[in-house]
Image (tube, rainbow, N blue to C red):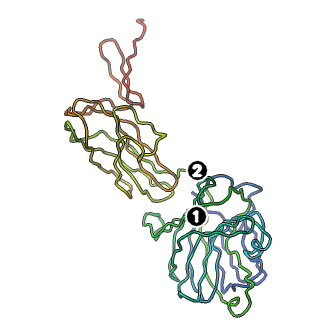
Amino acid sequence: MAAENFDTFVETDPGSVIEVTSSRVTWTDIEARQDNTHVSLDKGAAFFDGSFVHTLTISLIASEKGASYSFFWSMTNDLDDFQGLLDNSKDALVLRCVHPNSPDIPVIQIFELDSGSPSGSATKFNLTTGVVYYLTLTRNETIGSFGDLILTIYSDAARTTLLSTLTLNLNVKTDFRYVMVGQSFDATGGGGADLKKQTGYSEDLDIMGVTQGSTPQVSTQLPTLIAAATAVGNGTIADLGISAVTAHGWVWDTSPIDTAVAPGSQPNSTDGGAGSVGPFVTPITGLTGGLIYFARAYATNALGTTYGEGVQWKAGASYSTKEWGDTSMKGNELHTVGEDGVERAHMGTPV
């Protein structure tokens, strides 16, 4: 993953409230009424199509209650402030911070503009000024009719300690051209509320695609403590992917595992919940002695599930048998085990 260089973005800053370095965009005392301010990157028409993953680091340094705003991340097809997008019936996805008068707590929330019509995530997240947050924004268009926008918030740069997840069910599939940070609101409510200010920054923006190693990496090891009705499944999570692992375990059956089926819909499965990098074990129960079983480890994050390679064993035997990739000679036959766990014999021609 490589962060974008903000020096290559275009800065629009009529009020001189923006400071740009290669890795960070900082806005200082940006007022709610600030007109048409943003730092933008033009990736070309419809560049952001389908599913994608963006990561960035944010911090709200100072904030006045009574309707002050910051926009840490935005995707649009038009270079305008948020009010301009609303007034002109435009499309956008934004990560917005607002500090209301009551309760006196700044909060972030994800929003969609569909032809100027706004809809926001059902939940918000309370920010503490001066604290650094590490974010992952995922648009997953494989969910529902139009996809979801998912914001995962972490307290550490490795993105292993999850603080909260915000989810927004999208109303339309829209391709976007621009990614922006430091967008202004240009609020038009009048009065003192329009003068309220915030100071904050967005940093280390990575606009990677959905295919860049986003799902977890997991491998399957042979079961241990094999008995007639039970065994212990073994697996290893090598990489969490782009977000925290929310489910992991084993699936097993008396026929090869269909990896197109979600773990919870498999004939038999375990779920150890949130997972971390390293080996794990899981209890396997309800077996019938003498039967051959097929199994795979799995791990799931916000973008989907990865299955490990298949293994096979006989319930009640004191050993595991037939692991994918095994080869052996039996008489004059070469025996191999495929990824489906099935052993096949190969007879060559004498030479």
Badge 1 or badge 2: first in the primary sequence: 2
Quarter of image, res 225: top left
Q: Quadrant of the C terminus?
A: top left
Question: Mark 2 is on which residue type?
Answer: Thr
Q: Name the residue at the bottom extreme.
A: 192
Q: Measured along the vertical axis of the image, is residue 71 above or below residue 169?
A: below
The answer to whether residue 37 is above or below residue 119 is below
Say what amino acid the circle numbered 1 marks.
Answer: Leu
In the image, 127 versus 350, the foreground residue is 127
Name the residue rendered at 77%, 77% in the picture: 36
Badge 1 is on which residue?
Answer: 168
Kindly give the residue lying farthest to the top in the view shown: 351
Query: Horizontal and vertical percent for residue 230?
Result: 22, 41
Residue position for label 2:
142
Distance Cα–Cα, label 1 vs label 2:
14 Å
What is the x, y in percent for residue 256?
39, 32
Find numbered disc 1 in the image and state the secondary structure of the residue it sits on: strand
Question: Residue 18 location in percent, x, y?
Answer: 70, 79
